[in-house]
Image: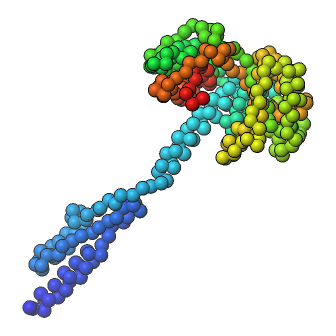
Amino acid sequence: MSAFASARRRVDLHLLRRCASYSSPPLRHTHRHVCSMVPDTATTSSFQQVSNFPQQTNQIQIRHMAGHNKWSKIKRKKAANDVARLKDHTKAARAIEAASRACQGDMADIHLQSTISAARGVQLPKERMERAIERGANPHMKSEGEEYIVRRYDGMIPTGNSGKVAVIVETLTENRNRTAANVRHLVTKTGGELLPTGANEWMFEHVGLIWVSRYMSNSHSVVGDSHEVPSIKSAEVDMDALLECALEGGATDVEFGPEESDIGYDDDDDADATDHYATIKCELNDMLQLVQTLKVDGYATTQFEKQWLLKDGGNKMLLDNESAEKFEKFLNSMDDDVDVTNVFHNASFVDE
């Protein structure tokens, strides 16, 4: 073998070793990249393979290994929670703005206090509450035609074997035509029908509900502060004393929750939910007076609002599993509409 041929062979072997050690940049931590190349025994052909290596992408074999990315699942779940939170915040801010516009920002107004209380229930930031109150109180901050109005729709929703469920849908919108079309579409898509407003009133009663904390208020109430939860737990509420105070203030019914010793706290959310010691029902016109009476006597009202409740438990419609699944889809579609604020119904599920 000539000296030239021997030198050229050494160059070929050197280039082949470099090719064998070549690896492309990793695409993901769950992928494994394999670079395989079978050298040719012929010197000329092997030199041709190496010299053309950058252009021949078919020489690189990428093998995708199975992998599970936990973060992708967490990210999707977090994104869904963020969307739901944003939707709840939008509805709460619009309700505050509408109530503030109706009372010109008067913090003593019962409707404004009720919407602020509900907004705190969905953890609406304080800064956004203040902007909504100011925006509603100042008519110059809102464009013409953007005033929010309350609209109500009555309907019947078929659920299959269990029969039809009566619903009352409450909305808050600046465009009644759009909202009416959306509600009609969601109702008819399930095979239901819209009824004249007030058609389902014989089955429901419009009342005020007030939730009272398990602990007495340890601070003076502030005008307009409708969500008083003691930062430091003080004395527990006496059942008999609360019942007497509520009845004197105009309550029509008082329902007490479980005792604290019977409650198991799984997380902070459950602990907050069980802090509602008593639920007080009253007439709409008596709600503000009753809330003020409770505050004067040292009780902390955690939330209060207006709701449509069934007059008679015999009007409940018990749903089987298949019917319940169909009706829950309807409720979810209503909840996805930002104009819909509440959906009241007479459905009862098997696990209730």
Spot occupied by residue 241 in the image (x, y as percentages of width and height)? 89, 29
**Coordinates of residue 61 in the picture (x, y in percent):** 25, 63
Whether residue 43 sits left or right of residue 127 in the image: it is left
**Where in the figure is residue 36, as x and y percent of width and height?**
24, 70
Q: Nearer the viewer, residue 94 or 85?
A: 85
Q: Measured along the vertical axis of the image, is residue 191 above or below residue 22? A: above
Identify the residue shown where x is 12% and y is 87%.
Answer: 5
Number of marks in picture: 0
Vertical placement of 284 versus 57: above or below? Answer: above
Q: Is residue 342 above or below residue 195?
A: below
Q: Residue at x 39, y 58 (%)?
A: 67
Q: Would residue 224 be seen by someone viewing this image from the given angle?
A: yes
Q: Nearer the viewer, residue 257 or 117?
A: 257
Q: What's the residue at 54%, 26% (across, down)?
A: 331
Q: Is residue 194 left or right of residue 289?
A: left
Q: Position of residue 90 (x, y in %)?
A: 62, 32
Residue 145 sits above or below residue 59 on the image: above
> Which quadrant: the C terminus?
top right
The residue at the far left in this view is 1
Residue 293 in sight from this viewpoint: no
Going by the image, does 24 lie left or right of 247?
A: left
Q: Is residue 15 left or right of residue 304?
A: left
